[in-house]
Amino acid sequence: MNGKRQHPPGFKAAIALEAMRTEADPAEIAKANGIHISLVYAWRQRLIDAMAAAFRSEDATTKEKESDSRRLTRQIERLRDEREWLCRVVSVMPRRQRAELVERDGGLSISTQARLLGLHRSMVYYQSEKRAGKMDDASPSDSA
């Protein structure tokens, strides 16, 4: 053992709060609780620092949220502009050519791709079945 007494956090908080009161004398608090006066000053200072940090983190969190919100808003606006540009460019393409752009194994659903390409979903399915039929006709395994 090192001879130092370990005080529980609740005890330290109570002493620090008592020391925060203007009418409380740190020397009297130390004597009444059987501790050295330097502990009263140290715990009071730690409480003051912790209170200031609590408000700083709240301000920082608010600023961080506002920053994230602005960043996400800019990103949404950029993506919207890119989508509008793409829709304008694709809209001048022939329908069959747009239907060929649909990816069956893509990350987007066929319905979403059709909507973005300005196509009816049924046309996309019809084109896909038609292409699948052509692939079956061209397979060399049937010619034996």
Image (cartoon, helix red, strand yellow):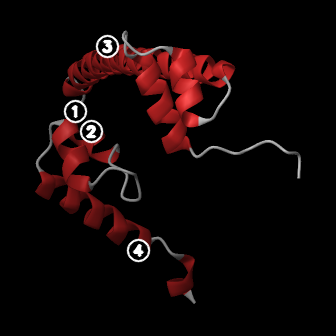
Figure check: 33 above or below 29? below
Secondary element type, mark 3: helix
Give the Cα separation between the discs numbered 2 and 1: 6 Å
Q: Are marks 2 and 1 in contact (CB under 8 Å)?
A: yes
Q: Position of residue 144 (x, y in %)?
A: 58, 90
Q: Which residue is mark 3?
A: 70
Eye-nearest disc, 2 or 3: 3
Three-letter code, disc 1: Pro
Q: Are marks 3 and 4 in contact (CB under 8 Å)?
A: no
Q: Which residue is mark 4?
A: 137
Say whether residue 48 is left or right of residue 40. Answer: left
Three-letter code, disc 2: Arg
Callout 2 crowding tier (Cα within 10 Å): few <14, some 14–19, many ≥20:
some
Callout 4 crowding tier (Cα within 10 Å): few <14, some 14–19, many ≥20:
few
Q: Which residue is mark 2?
A: 98
The earlier-in-sequence mark between 4 and 1 is 1
Q: Which residue is mark 1?
A: 94
Which of the pair 23/105 is nearer the observer?
A: 23
Secondary element type, mark 4: helix
Three-letter code, disc 4: Asp
